[in-house]
Amino acid sequence: MARRSRTHGLALAVWAILVATNLVPAFHAQVRKPPTKPNAAASFKIAGTAVSAMTSEPMSRAQVSVTNTNDPKDTQSLVTGDDGRFQFQVSKGKYSLQGAKRGFVASAYEQHENFWTGIVTGAGLDTENLILRLPPAAAITGKILDDVGEPVRNAGVTIYREDHSSGVSRILAVSGVATDDLGTYEVTPLNAGTYYAAVGAQPWYAVHPASSLTAGSTSVDRALDAAFPVTYFKDATGPDDAVPIPLHPGDHVEADFHLGAVPALRLVFRSTDAKLTRPILQQPSFDEAQIPQEGSMEQISPGVYEIAGLAPGKYSLLTTGPNQRVAKTHADIFLNTDGQELDPSDGTATASVRAKVHLRGADKLPVGLTVILRDAKGTNAGTSAIDEKGEADFAGLEPGDYEVVAFSPAKIYSVFRITSGEQTQPGHSLTVAAGSSHSVSLDLIGGSVTIEGFAKKSGKAASAAMVVLVPQNPEANLELFRRDQSDLDGSFALRQIIPGTYTILAIEDGWDLDWAKPAVIEHYRQHGQKVLIGDQKETVRLPNPVEVQPKL
């Protein structure tokens, strides 16, 4: 069945480490390979037309290739003529079909996110009249101007995108560029989707003089001590007021910014705790880790820091201890007064966790095994690679509840038991208290089962459907979800499945659904197939096809 470049479970485990833009798929290098000679036993054709996904016009000079999914070396490539036609002689099997052209987003056949529909030959299917659609690359461009209409050079522009790959809608950063000497920027190629944009910059004339706390301070015109607040399109000063930028294939949208300078704040961080050292200020940014905003920082004396050049706004303050580990956190601090003092004493003490990892059925841990703690918002709060002692170490954790997720480059794992002292509890939930230090034991199990089946609609093979494996209690078991896209003959494969009880379902064009939310998936789950996965190692083949459901 169709293999995929990433499984859903692994994507969940690393969603805050790797920003998956899906703009240039992993096959991009394949389409540039020289054509290989077709197999002498080839008796099937994969043929069709490469077209623009926006206009359906045939596409000349497009690079098209097919690759045997069981033998990546078995690849053929060509460049289309004026009619956009392509044709390959292949043997019986399953193939990926890919295309690329300048000005378009490189894509596989019926690609959605990192999933695509495989071309199956020898199954009585029509593989000679395929339409390979390449979406024209979209772009966001614009100009950054200051409050007197002058261009802002070297401003940092961050582009965010609404993302559904984790099953829950999240807004994540996908690209960043700097403006040129004219204050202009361009971000391309971009897929169709909903985007947001933000700009961070400093006025070119800004001077943040030393204060009376610093020896040798000088007098500087206060008007020069200015800062630009982080600004979101359209000229909003916070992510909650940001205006979305919808992009369709080939769109070139202008998103201009007008930055208004404000008097910069001078803040004093003063700590009597010798264990607390350098402070860190951050600002919120959609669904990700916050943006560091250090300004100009100078240590005045032991435990006393002066921070200059920050715009007023909402911040979080982190105070660090030995080895620069976060010792205390202060959420939602509103900084709006020049000379304001930051007192770390009223912050929330952070926690630490030391976890010993055990893998059921294995004498040693796999290379590259990594453990992640995910908070209630689904954000990765801590990541630790397993050390030579088989332990993971986390520090600077805010008090609260966490889900523990584990993965390696080759396999997905699930934490089925956590032991702390003499107390053992099933599952992967861990609660940490403020200022606490935990030593726990994590028992892991690896996914080793593959489920193969067919998606059908009204008795016929259904290709390009989103197939979802839904665990019991889905809200508490996000890492157990698996997804695939059905191939030309309706076949699919769900891999690395952890033992448990599941429901398999298929949804037509369901890629923009928040499919991991119980309220969304429950309707579809009622019409899915139940399947029980034990400790078996072999592939499970479904006896009955999965009926494709229309998207609500």
Image (cartoon, rainbow, N blue to C red):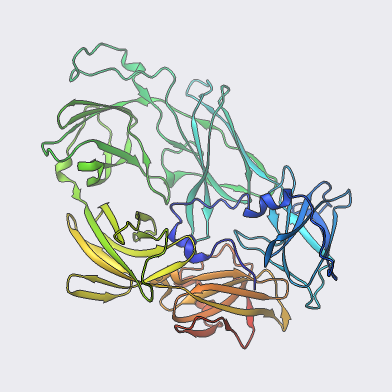
x and y percentages locating residue 45 in the rendered image = 84, 67
The image quadrant where one finds the C terminus is bottom right
What's the residue at 37%, 58% (across, down)?
377
Q: Is residue 168 visible?
A: no
Say how many tags the image has.
0
Q: Is residue 551 above or below residue 353?
A: below
Furthest toward the bottom, the residue is 543
Q: Residue at x 25, y 41 (%)?
A: 324
Query: Which one is in front, 261 or 478?
Result: 478
Left or right side of 119 for 319: left
Residue drawn at the location 64% of the way across and 67% of the way down: 509
- From the top left corner, tell me how far across and down residue 353 is, in percent: 24, 58
Measuring from the top left, give residue 34's x and y in whole percent. Answer: 77, 50
Camera-nearest residue between 81 and 172: 81
Q: Is residue 159 above or below residue 446?
A: above
Quadrant in the rendering for residue 345: top left
Q: Residue 505 versus residue 454: which sits nearer the camera? A: 454
Could you tell me which residue is drawn at 36 percent across and 60 percent down?
Answer: 371
Q: Position of residue 71 (x, y in %)?
A: 69, 64
Side of 274 where 15 appears, left or right: right
Residue that extends furthest to the front in the rendered view of this protein: 363
175 over 171 or under it: above or below: above
Task: Give the position of the N terminus as an image quadrant.
Answer: bottom right
Query: In the figure, residue 251 lies in which quadrant?
Result: top right
Query: Quadrant of the rendered structure where residue 117 is?
Result: bottom right
Residue 325 in sight in this render: yes
167 displayed left or right of 381: right
